[in-house]
Image: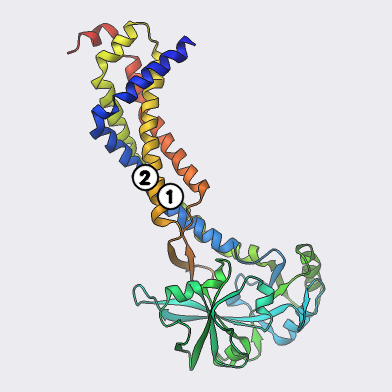
Amino acid sequence: MNWFTQILSISIFNLRAIPERKGSALSAAFGIAGVVLVLTAVLAIAEGFKKSVTATGAPDVAVVLRSGSDSEMNSGLSRDETRVISDAPGIARGKRGPLTSAELFVIIDLPKRSTGTSANVPLRGVGENAYDVRGNIVLREGRFFEAGKNELIVGTGAARAFAGLEVGKSIKIGPNTWQVVGLFTADGGIAESEIWTDASVLQPAYNRGDTFQSVYAKLNSPGSFNEFKDALSLNPQLKTKVERLNEFYAAQTTMVSEFISKIGVTIASLMACGALFGALNTMYGAVSARTREISTLRALGFGSGPVIISVLAESVVLALIGGVLGAGIAWLAFDGYQASTLNWATFSQVTFAFAVTPQLLVQAILWSIVLGLLGGIFPAIRAARLPIAAALRET
């Protein structure tokens, strides 16, 4: 108990002395706050992107592409093939028959609201069951498009990022003029970055004949996936690739999210080096300023262990203050912030919101504590090794 009492006594003494060195203490705390802020902000991009992907598609929704395709861009299916797919076992049924949607995927150029520069936006032609297949499409404004007409409904993310997509506006796409009639959400998923229209109207507009690129299917249950996949794989009329929709999008976007995460960690690590030197300088200065005090405590019988731990405690407290400050600013400034990035699989823009999650905040604060420990360990050892007699003679 005497050892713990020594630690407590010296630690309280050190913490009470922080206001006397508020300049250097604030410098160290703000340096670590900057590291935490940057790390949290960049990783919030990756978290938001992942959240957008995981919100796309339930496990009971499957997507069918041509065998060998890694995205809808290089896939192709004939109408006869889409009919065979719709007749496969395991597919749920609605009022209009099997819940499947044969779809087209076209990339168009639209100007960004923020800069006016053009960027790629996905224009998707869907079947009449597309809303029931996805299950998370909610109309927020206007109405759904009518079959056979040059009408569009726009995801809220696309409408927010690109000009000319307000409900009631007309927009020139390809050879035709289209009317924006509705605005929809999709639980924050990738569909909110898209523009939807009737596939039968999009086919002639882009000279696609009677072909499609994918078939989306609502299954009876998640457990029906293998039955559905095996039926298509064994059918000699088809050469297809079948995946769960959420796994399909996760595979397409893994490279982007990992790249963002690596960039964030790299930048934060470089900044952490600067913050670490700041913390070291602060703690060395604190030890130097209290050389006689520490030596006096040692002469009175306080052990080197309690001295080391007390200096580390002071360093961790300063780092924790900086960590909480940086995490708080990141949460207030970036949580829910709307942005867009390029989906490398389709070379089109994906809109999403930064997500500063509780797990991310805890991770950032733990990062600050590690910096505090690293910044305090060497000054703490120096304090414990001070020659008592020589230090007491210092003025």
Q: Give the left or right position of residue 326, taking residue 146 as reference.
A: left
Identify which amino acid the numbered label 1 is placed on: Thr
The colour scheme is rainbow
Please give the residue where the numbered disc 2 appears in the rendered image.
Answer: 35
**In this picture, is 270 found above or below 261?**
above
**In this picture, is 56 found above or below 3?**
below
Residue 293: image quadrant is: top left
Q: Residue at the spot x=32%, y=18% of the render?
A: 383
| Direction front: furthest residue | 141
Please give the residue where the numbered disc 1 appears in the rendered image.
Answer: 40
How far from the left and from the top, in percent, is residue 316? 39, 31
Query: What is the spatial separation of the Cα atoms under label 1 and label 2, in whole angstroms?
Result: 8 Å
How far from the left and from the top, in percent, is residue 228? 79, 70
**In this picture, is 370 found above or below 256?**
above
Q: Which element is circle 2 on?
A: helix
**In the rendered image, is residue 268 in sight?**
no
**In the rendered image, is residue 93 in sight?**
yes
- Which part of the image, by quadrant, shows the C terminus? top left
Identify which amino acid the numbered label 2 is placed on: Val
How far from the left and from the top, in percent, is residue 353? 47, 62
Mark 2, residues whose alpha carbon is within 10 Å: few (<14), some, or many (≥20)?
Answer: many
Q: Give the left or right position of residue 229, taking residue 263 as reference.
A: right
**In this picture, is 133 found above or below 274?**
below
Q: Residue at the spot x=58%, y=66% of the render?
A: 187
Label whose residue precedes the other's in the sequence (1 or 2): 2
